[in-house]
Image (spheres, rainbow, N blue to C red):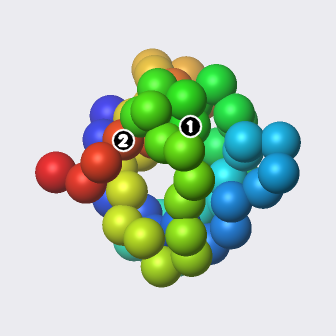
Amino acid sequence: MIEQATVSAFHADGSATVLRDDGLLVDVPPDAVAVGCWRSLRPGQRVTLRRDEDGSVTGLVRPV
């Protein structure tokens, strides 16, 4: 499953909080952020969330 979102915060541990387009805040673990090869993220930046069948975030990648 792919969803569009906007970065709300990028944390020192490499995790992030994003705001999905439907208005829900989602915490993204550091390993999912690393999938997109991000060095850093800035608030307001657009990203794409990838989720597995269980709904867990598996990747945070460049917007499509």
Residue lying at 55% horizontally and 29% vertically, measured from the top left:
34
In the image, taking residue 58 as reference, residue 64 lies left or right, namely: left
Query: Do we see residue 32 in this rendering?
Result: yes
Residue found at the very far top of the displayed protein: 53
Residue at mark 2 to residue at mark 1: CA–CA distance: 8 Å
Task: Find out whether the residues at labels 2 and 1 contact each other: C-beta distance under 8 Å.
Answer: no
Quarter location, residue 13: top right
Image side of residue 41 versus residue 22, left or right: right
Residue placed most toward the observer, 63 or 40 = 40
Q: Mark 1 points at which residue?
A: 33
Q: What element carries label 2?
A: strand
- Circle 1 sits in a helix, a strand or a loop, which is it? helix
Residue 20 horizontal/vertical position (percent): 47, 65
The furthest residue to the front: 39
Q: Residue 17 carries which label?
A: none
Specify the amino acid type for callout 2: Val
Q: Residue at x 54, y 59 (%)?
A: 41
Q: Earlier in the sequence, mark 2 or mark 1?
A: 1
The residue that appears at 36% across and 41% down in the rendered structure is 61
Residue 55 spot, x, y in % from top left = 54, 32
Up/down of 34 relative to 17, above or below: above
Q: Where is residue 48 in the image (x, y as percent from the top left)?
A: 34, 50
Left or right: where 3 falls relative to 57: left
Mark 2 burial class by Cα count in 10 Å: few <14, some 14-19, many 20+: some
Tag 2 residue? 61
Disc 1 residue type (three-letter): Val
Image coords of residue 27 (percent x, y): 70, 50
